[in-house]
């Protein structure tokens, strides 16, 4: 692949594109589903909360609603993911793009981590990491057979470097960041597209209760626009807002002594 061409083929139109959004019941996933449906994509909406999925479905334009599917599932249940994928593939006779937006956060802190915190840590890894594997296991055989299809994974800037109050969450996102690179390297030559999406802070249910100031906070609608624009451009490394994410990328390159000093300053820990 030439060095300066897009990492993935640009998406020039959404009309008729079959897109499965997992984690579509709220936040970034819901807003991206809404936006893609407005652009003419056929959307399949998945998450655990059926009522929220149905409310989103009911809110779509009549033509988008008619084409859309509502497939409630829990990503930690491999059999449920597999069965939803089978249903979707047979209903739509294929799939063009899956957007993995399902994720949970728990403010786990090292100084108070003990056996009582293990279930919370396990839950974060099960949803954020194993949930992703379950979706990959259900779709990769199909995508690699048809040598076409896109996999977009919402990871996070929290995976760039070690952070406080994010024991399992940041590790799960670091793993996803790494996983996306492996997927891209192996799947792009087979004709598949892979997108790694690292938002900064976004105002959603996930961040509603954080007890620190979130710099460069964006709305979920803005995040959806950023994601769709970057998918259209064929970017692999999708991150926003750039003013914040570029600074974090720079921090990642610094010697760790300097990184920890700046992190301590930024998070005002003593
Ligand atoms: N908000 C931020 O600042 C931020 C920043 C960077 C990255 N992200 C990432 O962006 C993604 C979306 O988060 P958000 O901010 O939009 O938060 P959100 O509004 O809480 O959305 C999370 C979505 O994940 C779904 N989900 C959670 N557990 C699930 C499970 N076991 N099975 C299926 N779906 C499940 C939720 O639906 P149900 O509860 O109905 O299952 C919901 O639709 C997450 O991966 C998050 O880590 C968020």
Image (tube, rainbow, N blue to C red):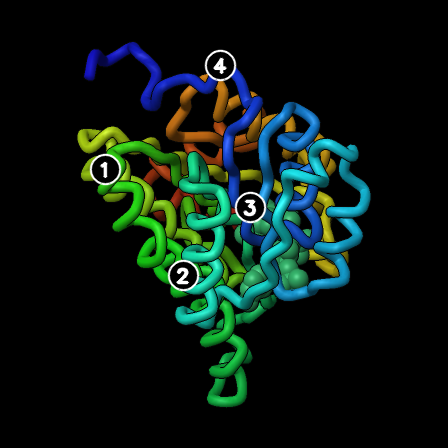
Q: Along the horizontal axis of the image, is 106 left or right of 62?
A: left
Distance, label 1 to label 2, CA atoms, is 19 Å
Distance, label 2 to label 3, CA atoms, is 16 Å
Residue for point 49% across, 39% down: 198
| Residue furthest bottom in the image | 115
**For mark 4, what is the residue?**
12
Residue for point 32% across, 22% down: 7
**For numbered disc 2, what is the local secondary structure?**
helix
Closer to the chain start, of discs 3 and 4, is 4
**For mark 2, what is the residue?**
129
Q: Residues within 10 Å of mark 4 (few under 14, many from 20)?
A: few
In the image, is residue 44 above or below residue 219? below
Q: Is mark 1 within 8 Å of ligand 1?
A: no
Horizontal and vertical percent for residue 66? Answer: 70, 40
In the image, is residue 69 above or below residue 198? below
Closer to the chain start, of discs 4 and 2, is 4
Q: Is mark 4 within 8 Å of ligand 1?
A: no
Q: Residues within 10 Å of mark 1 (few under 14, many from 20)?
A: many
Q: Residues within 10 Å of mark 3 (few under 14, many from 20)?
A: many
- Pick the front one: 259 or 27: 27
Residue 265 can be seen in this image: no
**For mark 3, what is the residue?**
21
Residue 224 is tagged as: none
Closer to the chain start, of discs 1 and 2, is 2
Q: Looking at the figure, which quarter contains the N terminus?
A: top left
Residue 187 is tagged as: 1
Distance, label 4 to label 1, CA atoms, is 21 Å
Mark 4 and mark 2 residues within 8 Å of each other at the beta carbon: no
Horizontal and vertical percent for residue 64? Answer: 69, 34
Horizontal and vertical percent for residue 130? Answer: 39, 65
């Amino acid at each position: 692949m030439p060095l300066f061409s897009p990492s993935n083929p640009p998406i020039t139109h959404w009309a008729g594109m079959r897109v499965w959004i997992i984690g579509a019941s709220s936040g970034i996933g819901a807003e991206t589903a809404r936006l893609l449906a407005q652009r003419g994509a056929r959307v399949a909406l998945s998450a655990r909360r059926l009522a929220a999925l149905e409310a989103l479905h009911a809110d779509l334009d009549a033509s988008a609603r008619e084409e859309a599917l509502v497939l409630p599932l829990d990503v930690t249940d491999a059999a449920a993911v597999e069965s939803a994928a089978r249903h979707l593939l047979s209903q739509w006779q294929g799939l063009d793009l899956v957007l993995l937006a399902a994720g949970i956060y728990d403010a786990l802190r090292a100084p108070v981590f003990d056996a009582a915190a293990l279930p919370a840590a396990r839950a974060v890894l099960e949803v954020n990491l194993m949930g992703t594997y379950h979706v990959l296991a259900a779709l990769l055989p199909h995508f690699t057979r048809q040598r076409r299809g896109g996999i977009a994974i919402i990871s996070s800037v929290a995976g760039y470097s070690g952070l406080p109050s994010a024991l399992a969450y940041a590790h799960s996102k670091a793993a996803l960041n790494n996983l996306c690179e492996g997927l891209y390297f192996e799947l792009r030559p087979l004709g598949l597209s892979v997108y790694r999406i690292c938002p900064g802070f976004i105002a959603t249910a996930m961040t509603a209760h954080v007890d620190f100031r979130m710099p460069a906070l964006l709305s979920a609608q803005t995040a959806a626009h950023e994601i769709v624009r970057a998918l259209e451009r064929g970017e692999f490394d999708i991150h926003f807002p750039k003013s914040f994410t570029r600074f974090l990328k720079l921090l990642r390159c610094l010697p760790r002594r300097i990184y920890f000093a700046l992190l301590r300053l930024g998070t005002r820990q003593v």
